[in-house]
């Protein structure tokens, strides 16, 4: 297996929440399960601004997304685009 450049440590991704690193959202809905998504909102292409608790929020038009990337509140109609990630020990990298 080829080691990839880490983008965040697993300890920095809160359980039941997530973090935004550059153009990637990393979430940890339950302990030990990590998801990666594009930070680009599927409504109008703005960059999501924050992960507040279990909500990934876009500042432009009020869309919010669940920790699995699905739409929690529109106007976005489709989920965030998935990003392939890999957990390497205590770090997370893009695949």
Image: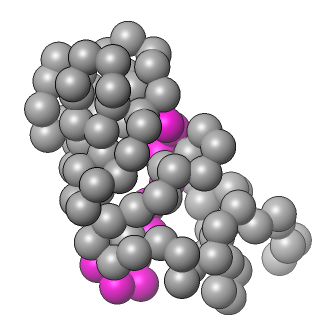
Direction left: furthest residue: 73
Quadrant location, the C terminus? bottom right
The relative height of residue 19 versus residue 58 in the rendered view (above or below) is: below
Residue 66: image x %, image y %?
A: 22, 49
Q: How many marks on residues?
A: 0
Q: Quadrant of residue 28?
A: bottom left
Can residue 68 be seen at all in this image of the molecule?
Answer: no
Residue 32 is covered by the magenta coloring: yes
Q: Magenta stretch: dominant SS?
A: loop
Q: Quadrant of residue 22?
A: top right
- Relative to 81, say whether 41 is above or below: above
Q: Is residue 61 left or right of residue 36?
A: left
Colour scheme in use: one colour
Which residue does the image show at 41% across and 84% down from the upper left? 32
Residue at 40%, 62% (x, y): give it.
18
Q: Residue at x 68, y 88 (%)?
A: 89
Residue 48 can be seen in this image? yes
Residue 24, percent across and down?
56, 45
Q: In which quadrant will I find the N terminus?
A: bottom right
Magenta segment, which residues?
Answer: 30-39
Could you tell me which residue is drawn at 65 percent across and 67 percent down?
A: 8
Magenta run includes residue 54: no
Side (left or right) of 92 relative to 57: right
In-front residue for pair 37/48: 48
Left or right of 66 on screen, residue 3: right
Residue lying farthest right?
2
Q: Position of residue 82 (x, y in %)?
A: 46, 43
């Amino acid at each position: 297996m080829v080691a990839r450049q880490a983008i965040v440590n697993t300890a920095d991704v809160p359980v039941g929440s997530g973090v935004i690193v550059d153009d990637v959202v990393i979430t940890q809905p339950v302990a030990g399960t990590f998801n990666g998504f594009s930070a680009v909102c599927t409504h109008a292409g703005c960059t999501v601004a924050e992960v507040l608790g279990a909500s990934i929020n876009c500042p432009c038009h009020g869309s919010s997304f669940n920790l699995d990337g699905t739409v929690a509140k529109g106007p976005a109609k489709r989920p965030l685009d998935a990003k392939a990630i890999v957990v390497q020990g205590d770090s997370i990298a893009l695949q």
